[in-house]
Amino acid sequence: MPSTVYWGSSQQTQLDHNETLPAKLDLILDRLHIRDRVKDKTVAIKMHLGGNIGYSVIHPVFVRRVVQAVLDGGGKPFVTDLPHATADAYTRGYTAETLGCPIYPSTGLEEKWYKTVPYEYCQMTEFHLGGAIVEADFLVDLAHVKGHPATSYGAAIKNLALGCVTGTTRSAMHDVSHFDPYFFKDKCPDEATRVAIRESCPFGAIVDDKEDPDGLHLHHFMCNQCLRCHEVANGAFVIRRSNFMAFLEVNVISAKLVLDTFAPGNATYINIANHMTPVCDCFGFTGMAILPDAGIFGSDDIVAVEQATLDMTARTPVIEENLPLSMEILSREGHPLQWFQGPDKDPYEQMEIAEKMGLGSREYELVDVLPVREPDYKKVHYIPASGKK
Ligand code: SF4
């Protein structure tokens, strides 16, 4: 049976605040019955609070409405993210006063507040899940949708997977991309060839291996799989889809371990798809939006909300003139975010993995909480600013 995804479009019929996204978020919160589900519960509102001078994070106006719904229902909300993001969140407009609830680091001030969960994947044997998440009763996964250099797409799954674990676990998760070997010394005839492979990458994604002077290291997040390196490598350096997809899969695993700490029915997911930039909010700056705003998606099914967001954001092409000049459109296949992040960072396959792991369903019914309608031009009029007579 398909899961329900509630959607508030960015489009409006009239110049009316009731047709804007914060008002539609209220309608989605109503449909998700947040108020009926949180009484006396500690509610973690997991966000990505961004970094440095980035401003394409979720505006406090939206957060405040989620917080208010939790308070209305008798819950005890707090906003949470990694310690480095919570420490300077006030510089991006996030304070207890603006949000209406406290802001806590998900893994503690010094990343010493966590629960160790054994799990074997590639070289990993355990995950450290943040104490603020593990101790909460209810989860609101409030995610900003954007591009991501390692996964191409980042929203609800990535928000949990990387934002609820310690730095040690995050680092180990990134290392799964190196699990399958990609540099084969026995096929590299000499140092000149090794250097030629390294220099063949126009994005600087191939560097010397710090732990092996004769080796090469690939920064997967900088690689768009253009395969220029293959032309000089003669099989000594191989771009492997498995290495890219391993990182997408470990994100699913981490998100699942986070969600397993909540009782059934005690998690809900909201994706806000506005000002979508090419890379993650942790880069600490904001460029031009590279996809048109696609609205707000809410569901109790994390896979369905991600699939619906992917499908909606794939309806329009990348705004190519808004891409930084250093980013290359490699093809126009797959999701628009793959056009420049590369075909092997496949968010659709990530959803297949998530579905197979039991996180949810890729089948969904999209319910528009306030459909736009054809305007009656006889009645269209300019609506003055609120508060003016
Ligand atoms: S595939 Fe292209 S982007 Fe990736 S390492 Fe090779 S040359 Fe660089």
Image (spheres, rainbow, N blue to C red):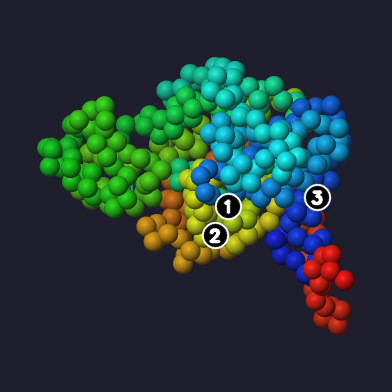
Indicate the secondary structure of the residue bearing disc 1.
Answer: loop
Seen in the picture, residue 19 relative to 101 is either above or below; the reply is below
All told, the count of numbered labels is 3
| Picture quarter with the N terminus | top right
**Residue 24 drawn at (x, y percent):** 78, 55
Q: Earlier in the sequence, mark 3 or mark 2?
A: 3
Seen in the picture, residue 250 relative to 16 is either above or below; the reply is above
Residue located at (46% from left, 38% from top): 245
- The amino acid marked with disc number 1 is Ser
Q: CA distance from mark 3 to mark 2?
A: 25 Å
Q: Is residue 108 left or right of residue 189?
A: right
- The amino acid marked with disc number 3 is Asp
Q: CA distance from mark 3 to mark 1?
A: 21 Å
Q: Which residue is mark 2?
A: 289
- The amino acid marked with disc number 2 is Ala
Q: Which mark is residue 299?
A: none
Q: Which mark is residue 56?
A: 1
Residue located at (53% from left, 26% from top): 166
**Residue 322 drawn at (x, y percent):** 48, 64
**Residue 181 drawn at (x, y percent):** 32, 31
11 and 131: which one is in front? 131
**Residue 251 drawn at (x, y percent):** 53, 34
Residue located at (70% from left, 61% from top): 10
Q: CA distance from mark 1 to mark 2?
A: 9 Å
Residue located at (61% from left, 29% from top): 105
Q: Is residue 388 left or right of residue 193?
A: right
The nearer-to-camera label among 3 and 1 is 1
Q: Confirm if mark 2 falls within 8 A of ligand 1.
A: no
Dot 2 crowding, Cα within 10 Å, few <14, some 14–19, many 20+: some
